[in-house]
Amino acid sequence: MITYNPKDWFTFVFRFHKADTLRKLVPLILGICAYTALIAFLELRVFQLSQNNYLKNISMMNNLLSFVISMLLVFRTNTAYDRWWEGRKMWGSLVNNSRNLAIKMNAILDPADEGNRSFFRRVIPMYANVLSRHLGEESTRLALDDKEHPELGELDHAKHVPNQVATLLVKRVNRLYQEKIITGDQLIIINGELQSFTDVCGACERIKNTPIPFSYSVFLKKFIFFYVMTLPLSFVFSLGYIAVPVVGFIFYVLASLELIAEEIEDPFGNDENDLPTQKISSNIKKHVQEIL
């Protein structure tokens, strides 16, 4: 995720980051400008349609459609941002629950019980790490010390790794309960944090695996395309050749909103504006090791 100062807005006007939509849209913008220039030449020079009232009425249609397309884009952008923000809230919950579990295990376990402390010190932040890789659809590669904790070597990276790590945590807690190291009341106290790991994973998978409906996305792209294609027919009469940059700018604004929505609706990828899940995982590891 890009880190920036939101108050330093003036420099944003002249700054072109690699995540800027202008870089991606330059070929299309140039094509739209060339198309508008061709329409202007045909209307003003070849066919001389400046007195044609029927074509002038196209501007009325554009005015009506501009309201419709603005409402669609507002809904599209808000929906995409809601998905991005929900993903951030889920990872915020994972941070808090990891800390809470580490704090509770630190209070419950004997300071001299280095074996169990080492296990939780390592496996609690491991969940965030494997979840980040799982959501990014990358293969999980962890340096596991099978001699210190043999159960870690049982992880099958071809299966759902976050579930396997959560299972390891639950099994270890259950074993501590059977060995009378923790009481039944203490088991109830830490059960909420153990369950929350899978809840966070399920919520993130729901965001990841449920994109915006295909029909809606296709319709919006077609709507933007045909709307921009009709703009030169009416703008040329009132603006002349100035309609070329104007139509190009309108296309840039509308298409940029759609591109931004496409990027942030899946917040767990590797795009510039996606959530920094690996950085959050590193912070969880740091804080858990400080506690335990």
Image (spheres, rainbow, N blue to C red):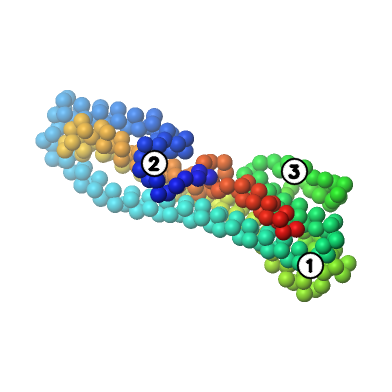
Side (left or right) of 149 relative to 102: right
Relative image position of residue 152 (x, y in whole percent): 81, 49
User: Local crowd at mark 1 within 10 Å, few (<14), some, or many (≥20)?
Assistant: few
Camera-side mark, 2 or 3? 2
Say which quarter of the image contains residue 201: bottom right
Q: Amino acid at mark 3?
A: Leu
Q: Give above or below for 249 relative to 199.
A: above
Side (left or right) of 162 relative to 236: right
Find the residue positioned furthest to the bottom: 185
Q: CA distance from mark 2 to mark 3?
A: 39 Å
Q: Which mark is residue 142?
A: 3
Side (left or right) of 108 relative to 240: right
Q: CA distance from mark 1 to mark 3?
A: 28 Å
User: Reading the chain from its start, which is encountered first: label 1 or label 3?
Assistant: 1
In the image, 267 versus 215, the foreground residue is: 267
Q: Residue at 26% of width from left, 39% of height from top?
A: 231
Relative image position of residue 85 (x, y in whole percent): 51, 55
Residue identified by numbered label 1: 108
Secondary structure at badge 1 equals helix
Q: Amino acid at mark 2?
A: Phe
Camera-side mark, 1 or 3? 1
In the image, 137 versus 23, the foreground residue is: 23
Residue identified by numbered label 2: 12
Q: Residue at 28% of width from left, 37% of height from top?
A: 247
Q: Which mark is residue 87?
A: none
Q: Amino acid at mark 1?
A: Ile
Q: Are marks 1 and 2 in contact (CB under 8 Å)?
A: no
Q: CA distance from mark 1 to mark 2?
A: 51 Å
